[in-house]
Image (tube, grey):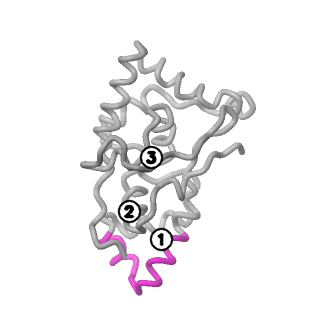
Amino acid sequence: MNQRAPVPFDAQALARALEVKRLELGLTWTGAAHAIWELSHELNARRHDHPISASALRNVAVQDGTSCQHALFMLRWLERSPESFLLGAPLDAGFGLPPAGADQRLRWNLRTLFAALDTARRRDGLTWKETASQIGCTPSQLTGLRKAKFATGMDVAMRIVQWLGRDSSFFIYAAAW
């Protein structure tokens, strides 16, 4: 598969970028969460589900990570790709996010991610343990994607994407439910 070991997703860089934009706009964390949520205001009005919280934004730095689905909210607001937050990556990593309107939210297609991972693993004759070792995670983090309803960690998602030799936008779509 990929000759180079996947590099980590830099959650601390994401946290710093959120802080910079929040301060530039003169927003509190609650204000930033509201601004992020309002990017999908038409969908939100239809779905009436729970908005992203200020604590989810603040916790990126504290917990040194976030779920892959929460990260998409933040990345959309920052207008940055996941690849631009890989450790050591330039700001413009050459990838982009799929476009999403006010009636959509960006989502990871975890079934497609799992299927691509499993296909590559089988093609290369690897066990889940060997695959996890190459990716830099646990086997259960990989096999759990098969049944994941909501998310995995952003670091794991990006390690898989790199191991597959794909860009993240292949596994991200604009959902309208």
Give the residue displayed 66% in from the left and 31% down from the top: 102
Residue 17: % across, % down: 34, 31
Residue type at tag 3 = Ser
| Up/down of 143 relative to 123, above or below | above
- For marks 1 and 3 on the same chain, the one whose residue lies earlier in the sequence: 3
Q: Secondary structure at mark 2?
A: helix
| Up/down of 68 relative to 27, above or below | below
User: What is the CA distance from the residue labelled 1 to the residue labelled 2?
Assistant: 11 Å
Mark 1 closeness class: few <14, some 14–19, many ≥20 residues within 10 Å: many
Residue type at tag 2 = Gln
* Rendering quarter of residue 38: top right
Magenta span: predominant SS is: helix
Residue named by callout 3 = 67
| Up/down of 141 relative to 34, above or below | below
User: What is the CA distance from the residue labelled 2 to the residue labelled 3?
Assistant: 17 Å
- For marks 2 and 3 on the same chain, the one whose residue lies earlier in the sequence: 3
Decide which of 110, 62 is in the foreground and name it: 110
Q: Secondary structure at mark 3?
A: loop
Residue named by callout 2 = 162
Residue type at tag 1 = Leu
